[in-house]
Amino acid sequence: FDDLYIGLVDPAKGNAGFYPGIFELIQAIPGDVKVGALTNAAVAYAEAVLSANNVRDRFASVHGADDVAAAKPAPDGLLQCCSELGVAPEHAIYVGDSPSDGAAARAAGCMSLSVTWGANPAETLAANSDGMVSTVRQLRSLLCLDPSQQQAPQRCSAAGSQGLDTAGEARGRNSGQVAASGAEGVHT
């Protein structure tokens, strides 16, 4: 099954492309911010999707359910990504689109930011999410990647270093690096 699934990644056919705005979001992440990907699909699928979308080189750590000790919602994969990135889990933000993403982040001690444009409705994401966004623009803003925030760096650094609540407002938690889910930016 994995080989068939991985074989479906074909940018020429428009499958496994990113949701609109995700490529630009990834490009906007400053070079000194470490980025990883973790998916419950095979690692080869994550590698294929990132390569097909021309962003593989931006991800310093990439893992799938088949190459970590236990798949999400267990924290193993996130802890492995954080270790490889040299980022303490409490300083990482995990962006995902499923309840297992939020549960894994919580179990690993990472901040969890859920996106609602995946396959799961917001009400199923809320229980394990530190914050929720419904647009790529909101995600860019909360990750301090919105060009308008360059005019207000104090607001951006406050949100980026303290975290988010479910309304997307700052709350007291230290986070600074990004460990991203392999699925939140992909549509098939």
Image (cartoon, grey):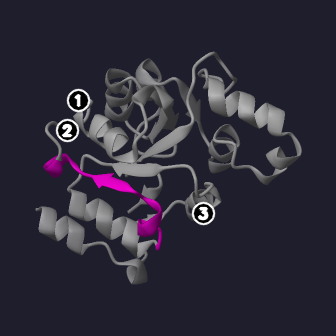
Q: Residue at x 69, y 22 (%)?
A: 170
Q: Amino acid at mark 1?
A: Ala
Q: Are marks 3 and 1 in contact (CB under 8 Å)?
A: no
Spot occupied by residue 152 in the image (x, y as percentages of width and height): 86, 40
| Residue at the spot of label 2 | 71
Instruction: Report how many numbered discs are placed on residues in the image.
Output: 3
**Can you say whether 57 is above or below 127 in the image?**
below
3D distance between C-alphas at marks 3 and 2 = 28 Å
Camera-side residue: 11 or 104?
104
Residue neighbourhood size for the residue with mark 1, other residues' Cα within 10 Å, grouped as few (<14), some (14–19), many (≥20): some
| Residue at the spot of label 3 | 27
Q: Amino acid at mark 3?
A: Gln
Q: Residue at x 32, y 55 (%)?
A: 62
3D distance between C-alphas at marks 3 and 1 = 29 Å
Q: Quadrant of the C terminus?
A: bottom left
- Is residue 49 rendered to the left or right of residue 133? left
Q: Are marks 2 and 1 in contact (CB under 8 Å)?
A: yes
As for residue 10 lying within the magenta part, the answer is no
Q: Which residues are magenta?
A: 54-67
| Residue at the spot of label 1 | 74
Between circles 3 and 2, the one closer to the viewer is 3
Camera-side residue: 167 or 148?
148
Q: Residue at x 36, y 39 (%)?
A: 82
Residue neighbourhood size for the residue with mark 2, other residues' Cα within 10 Å, grouped as few (<14), some (14–19), many (≥20): many
Which element is circle 2 on? loop
